Image (cartoon, coloured by chain):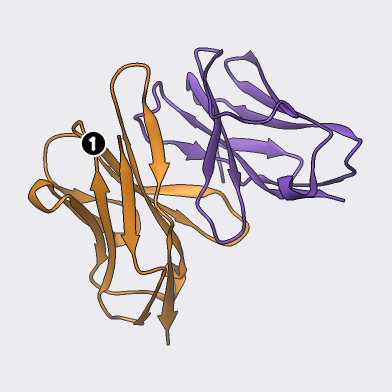
Amino acid sequence: DTEVTQTPKHLVMGMTNKKSLKCEQHMGHRAMYWYKQKAKKPPELMFVYSYEKLSINESVPSRFSPECPNSSLLNLHLHALQPEDSALYLCASSHQGIYQPQHFGDGTRLSIL
Amino acid sequence: AQSVTQLGSHVSVSEGALVLLRCNYSSSVPPYLFWYVQYPNQGLQLLLKYTTGATLVKGINGFEAEFKKSETSFHLTKPSAHMSDAAEYFCAVSGGSSGTYKYIFGTGTRLKVLA
């Protein structure tokens, strides 16, 4: 069983919809991450939160908006997405910094119509 | 700057044969190195990590990797492949100076195990 829980597992949305992806961990980790993974490709880092503050934004378009309400939760708000945004979105956490091993959730498979 | 190269996007081995997945890295500072495995429709799972100390690192499921600084390599091995090892394997490097840490994945190697 994964220790990082992501919901929903699947999401289909239109380009004008607003939706949110959720991620939760209860391992006491203080760093949390969002990745985007296209088929047959490695994960691409999008955002990093360290101690609930955004520390890295890899030039992600503003239609993706992260939020870290507390040390256990991480959200990714989606608005006006494009078909090319269809992908597997992975959440991960690590004890502290980005140099440490990461624990991944099973992801949300997002399809944009 | 850090980078990682995985040689061979697809590797096939017979069940019971040696598994060797290659990873070379580039880093301007001492790197932290990781191997992850991804099964279909799942997230990534950490197999093993190298930070400092012993250069031969043992991980889960019988995998191990050796950090060779002179060769800038961190190849993953397993003495005897099992059907359940069939998956995508990613090497990752992390490092950088304060404020510029990066976590970079290689392009992945898909391991196929033949009966």
Q: Quadrant of residue A13?
A: top right
Report x, y in % for residue A72: 60, 20
Chain B drawing hue: orange
Report x, y in % for residue B14: 35, 84
Chain A drawing hue: purple
Query: Would residue B45 be found to the left or right of residue A24 on screen?
Result: left
Query: Could you tell me which secondary element the residue under label 1 belongs to?
Result: loop
User: Badge 1, how many Cα within 10 Å: few under 14, some, many 20+?
Assistant: many
Above or below: residue A52 compared with residue B41: above
Query: Can the viewer see residue A28?
Result: no
What amino acid is labelled 1 in the image? Answer: Pro
Please name the residue that numbered disc 1 is placed on: B31
Residue at coordinates 91% horizontally, 36% vertically from top-left? A16
What residue occupies the far left of the structure in this picture? B70
Report x, y in % for residue A61: 68, 30
Query: Can the viewer see residue A1?
Result: yes
